[in-house]
Structures are given as structure tokens and as C-alpha cells.
Amino acid sequence: MPGSILPGVAGGICLLLAFFAFQVLPVSSVGVLLILFGLVLLMLEVKVTSYGLLSVGGILSLFFGSILLIDSPLPEFQLGMRFVLPVTLTLSAIVIFLVQLAVKAQRIQSVTGEDGMLQTLAQAVTSIAPGTTGRVQTRGELWSATATEPINAGEMVRIVGLDGLLLKVRPDRSAPAIPVGDGVGRQAREG
């Protein structure tokens, strides 16, 4: 499986080095817990709608956890602001960027499922009388369809509803009809 060997080996080496460093350095358990709590809050921001409050709490928790991480009176062992601030600001910028991408993605109109099918163009492959079932082609697929108005074969229709796998269509007089078998569905894909 690609990507399983190198990450596993690198992760194992990093864990062993971290365990060694934790024995040498006076690590504060409160600092470690604050950093872990901050990471959990940042991960929850993706799943829970908090309007950025979880991100702010996560970033503050990471900041204070980084300051409290090393519990030593010697300044050589403590993490300085020259390290803590750039890391916290960089992480904040990454989180803000990712949240903006998520908000943009939620605002984009769906192109799959029922929402993606509604109001798209299709072409009638067979004639459809009111209350009966016929066939239409859209996006390169043949679908069963029903209509409340008569539709001739080759006529362009607009999808107005779905009932399982049965499309509900109405004639679309703005799109010109093309003969069945002569590029069926070409204009449906363009719509």
C-alpha cells in the first residue's frame, strides 16, 4: 500500500525521539494537555458550527500550552516568544484559510443528487403524453420521465422534480429541439 512504509518509519522515529526528549526536558503535563486540548478544539471546528469560537479557543490553548510546556527555571530550556508567536500565528492563518475554504464549499450549488438535477435541460427521446411515462436523456443518461403537458420526441425539456428514479419534466420552449439520434443530449449537457 503506497504511503504506509515511509510515514510509519518516520512516525516511529519521531515518537522514540520525543519519548527521549520528554525524559531529558522538564515537560509540564499542563502544557501538554493544553496543546492537546487546542488541537482537539481545532479539529472540532471542522465538524461543529461555532462561528470561529472553537478556533479562537484552540489557538489560545495552543499558545498558553506552548508557553507552559517546559517547566524549568533555566531560560535556555524554556520556549521563547520568538518560537511560540510565529508558530501560533502560522497555525492561525492556516485555520482561517481552511475555514474560509469550507464556507465557500458550503455555498457552492450542488452538482450531484436531486439538487444537481433540478432545473437542468434534458431531451425527450420518446413522446410523453400527460400522465404517462416516457424517456429523456440528460448528462449522457436515459431516464424515465413524466409530464403534465404533451412533449414530442426530440423536444427539449427542463427537469422540475424527482420521484425516486422518475423525473418530472416540463417543455422548455427556449431551447431548440433537435432530431432524436442526431446528437441526442448535446444541448442537455450544455445546459
Image: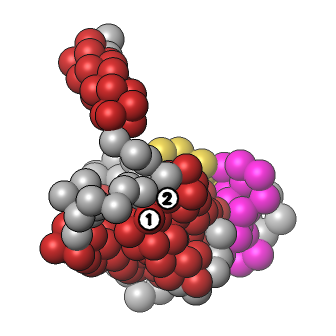
How dense is the environment of label 1, judged by Cα within 10 Å: few (below 14), some, or many (20 and up)?
Answer: many
Reading the image, the residue beneath label 2 is 31
Q: Residue 88: x and y, percent?
A: 31, 72
Quick check: is 10 in the magenta stretch?
no
Name which residue lies at 19% across and 58% down. 76
- Relative to residue 120, is residue 104 drawn left or right? left
Disc 2: CA contacts within 10 A as few (<14), some (14-19) or many (>=20): many
Q: Which residues are magenta?
A: 144-168
Residue at the extreme right: 131
Q: Nearer the viewer, residue 159 or 112?
A: 112
Figure check: 115 above or below 17: below
| Res 68 label | 1
Q: Position of residue 33 (x, y in %)?
A: 57, 54
Q: Main secondary structure of the magenta part?
A: strand
Q: Amino acid at mark 2?
A: Gly
Residue under the point 39% across and 36% down: 22
Residue 150, magenta (yes or no): yes
Q: Amino acid at mark 1?
A: Leu
Residue 69's quadrant in the figure?
Answer: bottom left
The image shows a total of numbered marks equal to 2
Relative to 44, say whether 85 is above or below.
below
Whether label 2 touches label 1, CB < 8 Å:
yes
